[in-house]
Image (cartoon, rainbow, N blue to C red):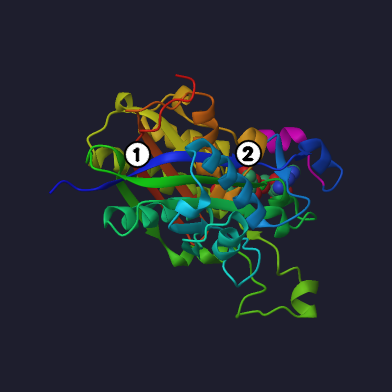
Amino acid sequence: MAKRRAVITAVGHYVPEKVLTNADLEKMVDTNDEWIQTRTGIRERRILEQGATSDLCVRATQKLLERRKIDATEIELIIVATVTPDMFFPATACIVQEKIGATNAWGYDLSAACSGFLYALVAGAQFIESGAYSKVLVIGADKMSSIVDYTDRNTCILFGDAGAAVLLEPSDNPHEGLLDHRLYCDGSGGAYLHMKGGGSLNPPTHETVDKRMHYIYQDGKSVFKVAVIGMAEVSAEIMKRNNLTADDVAWLVPHQANLRIIDATAERMGIDRSKVMINIDTYGNTTAATIPLCLSEWWERGELKPGQNIVLASFGAGYTWGAALVKWTLDNPKS
Ligand code: COA
């Protein structure tokens, strides 16, 4: 029997209105626009002033449901990838379920930092492929501004807030949808990128707050070196496994952490910059949201077309990293 595949049948995203530019950051820490742009490719990012990660999820999902022309009650499962849940519990997926009125859905959160969306996409696809469910909502969303230390120039320039979602549904065509994936983790990377405070290891106390342990810690240089290799290698691996040449790949959809990491990945794959989705300049690193945010924006602009091979790739805290091959199926809204 042919394998049932998970295909993306709708996309949606939301970015908050407030813009935090490099010029704004120059007034907050000892940095400058030239340094930020040269080292990262970022010009500005968005900040959610009111509300929480679930609100980013809800706004993205509402757009998705409008486009797919279905009611929230049709959704059967909600997976939210995030490292900035509204609260430790209940899961943000439950909060989203209630807010959008998805009364027939169950759901859970998944924590894999910048690889969160990729992990969640693969997890969601398993529920479709097994035949268990037919409408799985996969969301990547992070309110990074809630864990960024705006006195730390090493990290505060990097991150922004956003939410984006895809809907997975089944297809009987084994040659479309999520065709392949490779996911990895290496816990030894935890030392270089983490948030020390707030969990069971260092529950919140006055001391943990005074020591600024509830903010992101990153040893940027160490992470950079591994990220360049990890994302480039796994992207090349997914091409090799599927006998794809650079000409066969219509789009690389990379996690947006640093333009130099993105360029290194494209170079390793032999792919021209014109086939790489890049919006890090306007949003910075929105952690779990970067990949679906690209998909939704590029689809909206009519640049994603059925039949295209697209490679999604990520690297993040954990370390976690991976790549996925998707044969795109969703019609171009402009056709
Ligand atoms: N403005 C100006 N100078 C800054 C600065 C800023 N915002 N942040 C750091 N610097 C300084 C450093 O203090 C250092 O100064 P020193 O040499 O006097 O000590 C110098 O700039 C170089 O810092 P370094 O950390 O070596 O820069 P870099 O080229 O590695 O770039 C990152 C820093 C964070 C942009 C880069 O390392 C990176 O992108 N890392 C990986 C991020 C990532 O992929 N994360 C995983 C997914 S979230």
Would you place residue 54 above or below residue 159 in this image?
A: below
Q: Which mark is residue 40?
A: 2
Q: Nearer the viewer, residue 236 or 53?
A: 53
**Residue span colored magenta:** 30-41
Quick check: 79 left or right of 270? right
Disc nearest the viewer among 2 and 1: 1
Q: Is residue 261 visible?
A: no
N-terminal label among 2 and 1 = 2
Q: CA distance from mark 2 to mark 1?
A: 27 Å
Q: In percent of the image, x 73 and y 49: which residue is there?
A: 48
Q: In percent of the image, x 59 and y 33: which residue is there?
A: 279
Do labels 2 and 1 touch, CB within 8 Å? no
- Return the residue at label 1: 326
Packing grade of label 1 (10 A; few <14, some 14-19, many >=20) is many
Q: Position of residue 88 (x, y in %)?
A: 61, 71
Q: In percent of the image, x 63 and y 60: which residue is there?
A: 84
Quick check: 155 left or right of 316? right
Q: Secondary structure at mark 1?
A: strand
Quick check: 248 left or right of 214? left
Q: Secondary structure at mark 2?
A: helix
